[in-house]
Amino acid sequence: MKKARARTGGHEFLVEQKHDGVHVNGHVLPVEWTAKGRQQWNLRVGAATYEAVLLPSDGEDGIVNVLIDGRAFRVEIDDEARLLLKKFETEQPTKVHAATLRSPMPGKITRVLVSVGELVEAGQGMVILEAMKMENELRSPAAGIVKSVRVEAGDAVEKNALLLEIA
């Protein structure tokens, strides 16, 4: 999963790429894009199509200039690392700590949504566990960096099995 916060024209958008699509401010959007050139794309959002061109940067970190259907936008982007750093700066230190994710019940791992070294936030989906004919998204108990992933898709796990560690 990738996550970024984008601000433009007085509006702020939280954009997340999850296993089921692109989410903007919590809503799934049917977005597709096709590269037309090195810094040019065709975007399809639902039935609407747009042409997007990445313009030369003015050198400011986290600032992107984009031309969409001829309209210029200056977009401030906080990527995952920048979001996590900002979260660390604003939260109490006790909220960020090492943690483990354990299976709450026996079942089968159908998907692992993160990888070692990835920055995660508390509450972020980490693993999909199938149990009792239902898929359950197991979420991170803390913000941090994924230190180890102990399971992979297809693994059967017992209750309280260690699935991954966060540092």
Image (tube, rainbow, N blue to C red):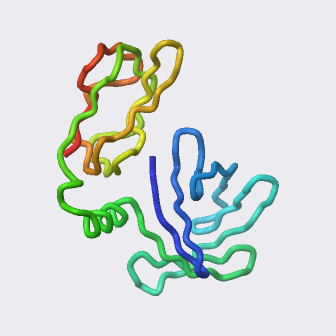
Residue 47, relative to residue 20: is it above or below? below
- Which quadrant holds residue 151? top left
In the image, is 132 to the left or to the right of 55?
left
- Using the image, determine if residue 39 lies above or below residue 117: below
Residue 37 located left or right of residue 133: right
Q: Residue at x 52, y 49 (%)?
A: 17
Please state the horizontal and vertical placement of residue 12, each as a whole percent of the image.
55, 71
Name the foreground residue: 35 vs 108: 108
How far across and how far down the image is residue 137, in percent? 45, 32
| Residue 52 vertical position relative to residue 19 in the rendered view, above or below | below
Q: Nearer the viewer, residue 15 or 117?
A: 15
For image coordinates 31% across by 51% down, the residue present is 119
Residue at the (48%, 82%) spot, across then down: 57
Quarter of the rendering containing residue 91:
bottom left
Percent x, y for residue 4?
A: 46, 61
Q: How many marks?
A: 0
Identify which residue, 115 or 39, lies in the foreground.
Answer: 115
Identified at 58% across, 80% down, the residue is: 10
Residue furthest to the right: 47
Using residue 16 as the reference point, say whether residue 152 is left or right of it: left
How far from the left and from the top, in percent, is residue 63?
46, 78
Q: Toward which corner of the image does residue 50 lie, by quadrant?
A: bottom right
